[in-house]
Image (cartoon, rainbow, N blue to C red):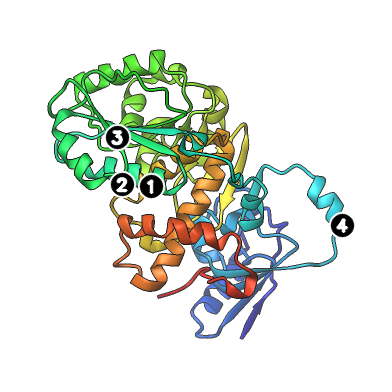
Amino acid sequence: IIVDAIFGIGLNRPPADWVKRIIADLNTSDAFTLAVDIPSGLFMERAVEDREAVIQADYVLSFQSPKLVFFLPETGVFLNQWEVLDIGLDRTFLSQTETDFGLVGKNEVLAGYRPRPKFSHKGTYGHALVIGGSYGKMGAVVLAAQAALKAGSGLVSTYVPQCGYTIVQTAFPEGMTLTDTGERKLTDIDYALEPQGVGIGIGMGTDKATVNAFSNFLSKNKTPMVIDADAINILAKNKALLKEMPKGTVLTPHPKELQRLIGSWKDDFGKLKKARSFSKKYDCVLVIKGAHTLIVYQGKGYINVTGNPGMATAGSGDVLTGILTGLMAQGYPPLQATIFGVYLHGRAGDIQVEHTGYQALTASVIIEGIGPAFLDLFAPPEKQEVVANKEE
């Protein structure tokens, strides 16, 4: 066993060459490496300059709280698992101190959970509308709509091109389906419904007619929105449309879509800086998808603890869009809906992967895990299935 306590969180320059040689030697050892507080060589607030000068830790015992670098793709690779040690710092001070980033687990999610009253009906829980689809891409809409219903929305409707009518009605019998005037793509987004939450962009495509339809829709829509996939790509190419988004709009880009939206970055810290600036400028909730999905709003970041590599599969993002839309339709404020929805999405995947393994986990299976994920919120600790940094 190697106990790494060379440097702590105060490191502010690259290790000297002779220390780098020691670290490189330790990293080639077959011993189990336990790091104290943080793997030596990692900085707290900037990227690694020399990857060979950082300890590769099997386990980290971190003082009082985990560190941001544990959750970022470029720095999180230097540790496999972590555990927090309470060293007696004042809990009142810690709870009252504002931080730029917070960790979101079960307790944080439960604080915002809304129980269902006995005397209620489907109208009590809102109407979610999923807009999207094009020829050959109707499955995305089906997945999002199913997820919105599973997340608790009382009613779910879809708005799709005419070619999707039979598909959606057959695959999603619980929902209602409206069709566009376009046969194979969206050309005119117009409906008489009054939904409480709208999810748009999944499978939509970026045809010129669809871009115009989306632009016209943005100019008149005031309903809380979740914007995903092709709708994000349209915004990235037509930045003027960003000003048309309702306040609190939720954007859920994958890494490439995020890059198109906010511009390229040098490292993860540069990415976070750009994301926080973008979120403030357009008053939107920005979801940075990843192994630890990070939510940014009004300058603050929220790091999710659920999810696993099996969720890197086609349609998983469509399911997330549906969950968020369903929660917003129920009246959850955009930020709260996003924090709750990202947690549920990841927890559903964690529960289901226990039965499928990473490779066989699919978006449809994740949807089936939404119910168990809700139940897990209220399960006593000894009954919970714990899936944290699990290796296959």
Q: Is residue 200 visible?
A: yes
Q: Give the distance between the C-alpha atoms of the residues marked 4 and 2, in whole angstroms.
A: 46 Å
- Residue identified by numbered label 2: 143
| Mark 1 crowdedness (10 Å alpha carbons): few <14, some 14-19, many ≥20 | many
Q: Is residue 71 above or below residue 294?
A: below
Q: Determine the secondary structure under disc 3.
A: strand
Front position in the image: 61 or 135: 135
Sequence-wise, the earlier of marks 4 and 2 is: 4
Q: Is residue 50 above or below residue 380?
A: above
- Residue identified by numbered label 3: 176
- Of marks 3 and 4, the one in the foreground: 3
Q: Give the distance between the C-alpha atoms of the residues marked 3 and 4, in whole angstroms.
A: 54 Å
Front position in the image: 297 or 168: 168
Q: Is residue 112 above or below residue 49?
A: above
Residue positioned 51% across, 68% down in the render: 389
Q: Determine the secondary structure under disc 2.
A: helix
Sequence-wise, the earlier of marks 2 and 3 is: 2
- Amino acid, disc 1: Ala
Residue 336: assigned label: none
Front position in the image: 65 or 41: 65
- Of marks 4 and 1, the one in the foreground: 1
- Amino acid, disc 4: Asp
Q: Give the distance between the C-alpha atoms of the residues marked 1 and 2, in whole angstroms.
A: 6 Å
Residue 147: assigned label: 1
Residue positioned 17% across, 20% down in the render: 181
244 left or right of 158 in image: right
- Residue identified by numbered label 4: 90
Q: Where is residue 220 shown, x and y percent of the image? A: 40, 13
- Residues at marks 4 and 1 touching, judged by CB atoms closer than 8 Å: no
